Image (spheres, rainbow, N blue to C red):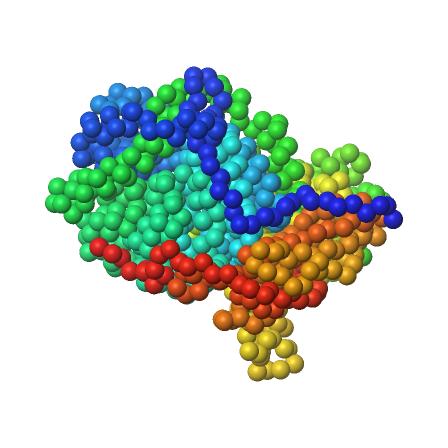
Amino acid sequence: MKFARLVRLCAVVLPLSLGTFALVGCGPSEEPATPKDAKANAPDPRIARLLGEMTLEEKAAQLFMAAREGTDPFHNENLGRKDEVGAVLNFTGTKDIAAIRTAVAESRLKIPPIFGLDIIHGYKTLYPVPLAEAATFDPSIAERSAELAAREARANGQHLTFAPFADLSRDPRWGRIVEGSGEDPLLNVLFTRARVEGFHRGGLATTVKHFAGYGAVEAGRDYGPVDMSLSELRSRYLSGYQAAVDAGTDTVMTSFVALNGHPATANRFLMTDVLRHEWSFKGIVMSDLNAVKELIEQGVAADEEEAAYQAFTAGVDMDMESGIYMRQLPDLVRKGRISVADLDRSVTRVLELKVKLGLFDEPMPDALKAAAGTATSEMLDFARVSAERSLVLLKNDNNILPIRPQVKSIAVIGAMADSASDILGPQFAEAHGQDGETIIDGIRTRAAKNNISVAYVPGCNASCDETKGFGAAVYTAAAADFTILVLGEPMFLTSEGGSRSSLELPGHQAALLKEIADTGKPFAVVLLAGRPLALSNIVNEAPALLYAWYPGARGGSAVANVLFGDAEPTGRLPVTLPRTTGQVPLTYNQYAVGRPADDGNRFTNRYVDTPSGPLFPFGFGLGYGKVDYGKAMIARTDLTKDDRVEVHLHLANSGKFAQLETAQLYIRQKVASRTRPIRELKDFRQVHLNPGEGADVQLSVPVSELGFYQEDGSYTVEPGVYQIFAGADSTAPLAGEVKIKDGLKRDALVAANNTTIKN
Ligand code: BGC
């Protein structure tokens, strides 16, 4: 064994530090603005001058974000003057952007609009979807991809991304789980913060969304209501958004949901009390698409005037898409229901962002420069590296992977192996199918290096709703030394409006797998998916399972590199994989129950028709090495509120391959004033171990972060006994207990039961 070493690749430190920045203007022919120049924080004289010159209508226009070919006046002459928009969304391409900017430059006030777009995991170059990035357990990956995406988007004339997505989701039926960081609050905080920092570094302004609780929609059905205790809301759901605010997000987007009966877009408790008063947010609050208008459908506003009034007075500065603010705010001011000062405050926020972004001095986007800053080799290389890091190896019987050197012929089966759009995933911004490298391309390129022949047969279409191609697939697999079977859910089944009532593989995919297995030849399954799938009906038949999510523009080579062992599988599950759909929500951090699941006892917290627990637990993932964990040692067991829980572990790789291991620390408060989760992830470290190598790893968490929120909004760390678990995933063994002698309590800044709308 080689000498032990201490490695800290991915440090996790809470509480969140306050990030400060300002976006500065990019001068003619310069790189995109970088968020550094403190001078940009000084009030810009143009803002006061413009406020003095603007009519009420022009002010209201600044609070309107028009959607391309929806309510945008550039494509619809009936929708008002061309300078009557504060921002636009979904305009792409330097030609389109330049045309709008020229129109605005000819208007009375010449106030440049903000160009916003959903740049979620890349602009033209797509990186793995956010859920896949969370599987890296390395927020620096998300930070870097956000930075590169921002650079590319800014070079193409964009200013604002509607990201990061901080909606914690515990229900994978909800299609938008693909856009977030999974089920765990700590990962959600770390990845959200990293993305804000990355986007800013690349020159884009950010929007944290969707404030708040969108990920908890009832039964995972998109746009549904959310009902949860305020303790739960604060302890699990709000921390991701707060992390973005602390990191300096420029805007916050409301969520479509009614939270505890009060639509977020008219929810003063969220938009003003929590956001402005508690978290000191200074930027713009914008509605989600058409959400101001939907207040009428949600049954809290009788008409447009009431919808505008409720949203604005709750604290929403900007109306995306509906146009209601443009139509209603001037009259609301004239009627005295809204003050000019309040209107000016919101307009000032919008103008301030324009100044920070340098929009008043921004040169026209240049097609040649944009092309030079698009899909660069640096971006494409990182797309491959980040994809490799995100792949999760779930099963590898008899070390069937990596593919052995003796293999001379490979069969690739599955329609998604040849689908570039299913590699890219559902949020493609400005990318098109041809920008994604397919799995079959990646495998062919890699196989050619070793003169391995590759035969490809789809077997069925991506939804696998017919079986007539199975014969050819089986024939091809039987003739090959090794088969790679690519299955999963096509990307159109995920993301917005992509809720599913079944988490099983769509169509006849399980039957196709069974037929391939029946050939008796070795094979591995690669799964493309945007959510945790329920894999019980294939898990026993599949000797190897590689969860590839939607891995982005270079997903093909990333998958090939991992299958061939050129890259290690390093991902860990940021979500629990259930056995069946009926088990969900099923998460590792559920609250303790009086009768924990016991499959031998009917009267426990279980189902009668399926074994308890997940198929694969949160935090799980294999490597090609074999890492053994020594006994965890707790540094000190008697602690005060100012101490840290500190655990030391020795890890050793006795396998034949190197492995990036992710050691994880979980805690449970044994006896508390309210029922607590059975485990909570509190820290993790990644350590790279060559064969035969060992390393000491230290995991720790400040005692001040072991607490939770009470219903009244106060935060408490209670004295008492806490169990400590340390190991490779969320089933890690008990390492011991610590005793916290004193506790701490922070009172709420705003009344916690204040979810009602104050008119
Ligand atoms: C989505 C947002 C998105 C917006 C603009 C809405 O339907 O909920 O996440 O940013 O559209 O595309």
Residue 85 image offset from top left, x and y in percent: 28, 33
Task: Please report the residue visible at 37 percent of the width from the left and 55 percent of the height from the top.
Answer: 749
Can residue 664 be seen in the rendering of this structure? no
Task: Please report the residue visible at 36 percent of the width from the left and 28 percent of the height from the top.
Answer: 42
Figure check: 25 above or below 348: above
Q: Which residue occupies the foreground of this view, 540 or 148?
A: 148
Q: Which residue occupies the foreground of this view, 466 or 190?
A: 190
Residue 485 image offset from top left, x and y in percent: 68, 51
Picture quarter with ligand 1: top left
Of all residues shown, which one is farthest toward the left? 335
Of all residues shown, which one is farthest toward the right? 1
Q: Which residue occupies the foreground of this view, 650 or 32?
A: 650
Task: Please report the residue visible at 45 percent of the width from the left and 58 percent of the height from the top.
Answer: 746
Can residue 39 be seen in the rendering of this structure? yes
Residue 565 image offset from top left, x and y in percent: 76, 43
Task: Please report the residue visible at 49 percent of the width from the left and 58 percent of the height from the top.
Answer: 236
Residue 305 image offset from top left, x and y in percent: 18, 49
The image quadrant that residue 730 belongs to is bottom right
Figure check: 372 above or below 518: above
Figure check: 377 above or below 302: above
